[in-house]
Amino acid sequence: MARQFARAGARWVHFVDLDRALGTGHNRELARRFLASAAEQVLVQVGGALATEAAIAEMLTWGASRVVIGTQAAIDATLVARLLARHGADRLAVGIDARDGRVAARPSALT
């Protein structure tokens, strides 16, 4: 898929593990394989309930260009500060979920 997107002109791909985000499982092995193959094609931003330092470091180690810190960022500013100090602002983004006009912060079901 990454090769197809790159040929079509994409510079970035946003990869979300929906099973992890919804708390119904995870696709870690697929993420690892995708990141390994996509790294030479496009930049990859990864999201999907990534709320711990270990989970975020894992994705960056596997080749993610940037990781989206989930709603945990809205309730744990010290986590964000530690991650920024460790990985830098270029490697992190904060995803903010909203519902009915309000920030919908909730702890992740899986880490």
Image (cartoon, rainbow, N blue to C red):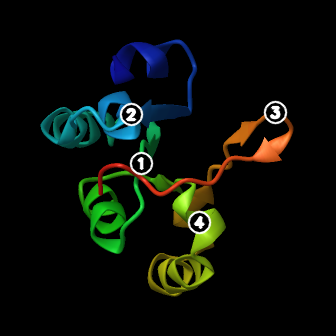
Q: What is the distance, in whole Å, between disc 2 and disc 3 at their CAs?
A: 19 Å
Please tell me which of labels 1 and 2 falls first in the chain: 2
**Residue 49, disc:** 1
Q: Nearer the viewer, mark 2 or mark 4?
A: 2
Q: Is residue 37 left or right of residue 45?
A: left
Q: Nearer the viewer, mark 1 or mark 3?
A: 3
The kind of secondary structure element at disc 2 is helix
Judge whether 96 appears above or below 89 on screen.
above
What residue is disc 4 on?
73
Question: Residue 84: horizontal and vertical position, in percent?
Answer: 55, 79
Residue at point 63%, 49% (across, down): 95
Looking at the rendering, which quadrant does residue 21 occupy?
Answer: top left
Q: Identity of the amino acid at label 3?
A: Asp
In which quadrant is the C terminus drawn?
Answer: bottom left
Q: Identity of the amino acid at label 4?
A: Ala
Please tell me which of labels 1 and 3 falls first in the chain: 1
Please tell me which of labels 1 and 4 falls first in the chain: 1
Q: Nearer the viewer, mark 3 or mark 4?
A: 3
The kind of secondary structure element at disc 1 is loop
What residue is disc 3 on?
100
What residue is disc 2 on?
22
Q: Nearer the viewer, residue 65 or 110?
A: 110
Judge whether 103 appears above or below 75 on screen.
above
Please tell me which of labels 2 and 4 falls first in the chain: 2
Q: Is residue 23 left or right of residue 108?
A: left
Q: What is the distance, in whole Å, between disc 1 and disc 3 at their CAs?
A: 21 Å
Q: Is residue 49 left or right of residue 99?
A: left
Residue at point 35%, 34% (across, down): 17
